[in-house]
């Protein structure tokens, strides 16, 4: 909070994204650099996407005054075509009354409790299919296709028995059987999949969106 307050007293000149560059040999991180100016006079803010340490892939510019209208700034790091579309959308009034609920799928405590219940599926054994950010691609679940790494464990077909989850948490059980969109966190692009039939348990580092099926179809298209 202190850092955010300090930044709010300055003008943002540039954010440079090195997330696709191996800046540090032995660390898997997504580094960025931020350039600020002490005065708060309106200027142009620049968002730069780097291909390597020197080569610039793309530059997106906008009025600094527009930053306060957007809670999340990831939209400023997309390709030129997408950026132009998003900029045009932002010219219009926002929808603020969609009948949805957005929730963090699992707290740290939840994650460790789930770890104690998760098992590799044998045959047609029943249970909620566990997915996390690593097993979500745009529009699809990779459960059973890509290994799910979960708190030092690795599973190809991880499940949590229905009754085990219900006994642990009625709330988590209800969320899991509900229609939802599961959104991956800590990614360099937007990744989410649709779970209309309530088959999936959303694990650590995900967000879920609950709502009417028609609304969820609309959201996943976006």
Image: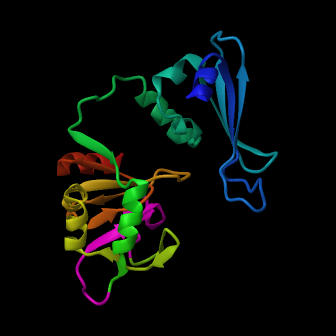
Residue 142 shown in magenta: yes
Closer to us: 97 or 108: 108
Magenta-drawn stretch contains 52: no
Q: Residue at x 36, y 80 (%)?
A: 119
Residue 164 versus residue 123 in the image, above or below:
above
Q: Is residue 204 left or right of residue 60?
A: left
| Residue 108 at x, y percent in the picture | 43, 56
Question: Where the N terminus falls, by quadrant?
Answer: top right
Residue 149: x, y in percent? Answer: 49, 71
- Left or right of 199? Residue 91 is right
Residue drawn at x 49%, y 75% is 153
Residue positioned 62% across, 28% down in the render: 3
Horizontal and vertical percent position of residue 83 = 53, 36
Q: From which residue to which does the magenta span run?
A: 122-143
Q: Is residue 98 above or below residue 195?
A: above
Q: Position of residue 23 (x, y in %)?
A: 77, 53
- The quarter of the rendered structure image containing the C terminus is top left
Extreme residue toward the bottom, this view:
123
Q: Nearer the viewer, residue 144 or 9?
A: 9
Can residue 131 be seen here? The reply is no
The mark tally for this picture is 0
Residue 74 appears in the rendering = yes
Q: Quadrant of residue 6?
A: top right
Using the image as rendered, state which of residue 214 and residue 102 is in the foreground: 102
Quadrant of res 130: bottom left
């Amino acid at each position: 909070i202190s850092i955010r307050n300090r930044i709010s007293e300055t003008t943002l000149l540039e954010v440079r994204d090195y997330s696709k560059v191996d800046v540090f040999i032995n660390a898997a991180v997504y580094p960025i650099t931020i350039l600020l100016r002490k005065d708060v006079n309106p200027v142009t803010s620049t968002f730069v996407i780097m291909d390597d340490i020197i080569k610039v892939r793309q530059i997106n510019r906008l009025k600094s005054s527009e930053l306060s209208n957007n809670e999340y700034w990831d939209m400023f790091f997309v390709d030129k075509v997408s950026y132009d579309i998003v900029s045009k959308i932002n010219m219009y009034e926002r929808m603020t009354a969609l009948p949805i609920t957005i929730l963090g799928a699992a707290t740290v405590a939840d994650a460790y409790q789930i770890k104690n219940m998760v098992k590799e599926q044998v045959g047609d054994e029943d249970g909620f299919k566990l997915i996390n950010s690593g097993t979500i691609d745009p529009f699809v679940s990779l459960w059973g296709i890509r290994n799910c790494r979960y708190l030092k464990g690795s599973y190809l077909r991880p499940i949590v028995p229905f009754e085990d989850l219900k006994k642990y948490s009625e709330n988590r059980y209800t969320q899991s059987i509900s229609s939802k969109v599961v959104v991956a966190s800590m990614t360099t692009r937007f990744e989410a999949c649709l779970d209309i039939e309530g088959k999936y348990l959303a694990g650590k580092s995900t967000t879920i969106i609950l709502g009417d099926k028609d609304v969820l179809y609309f959201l996943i298209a976006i």
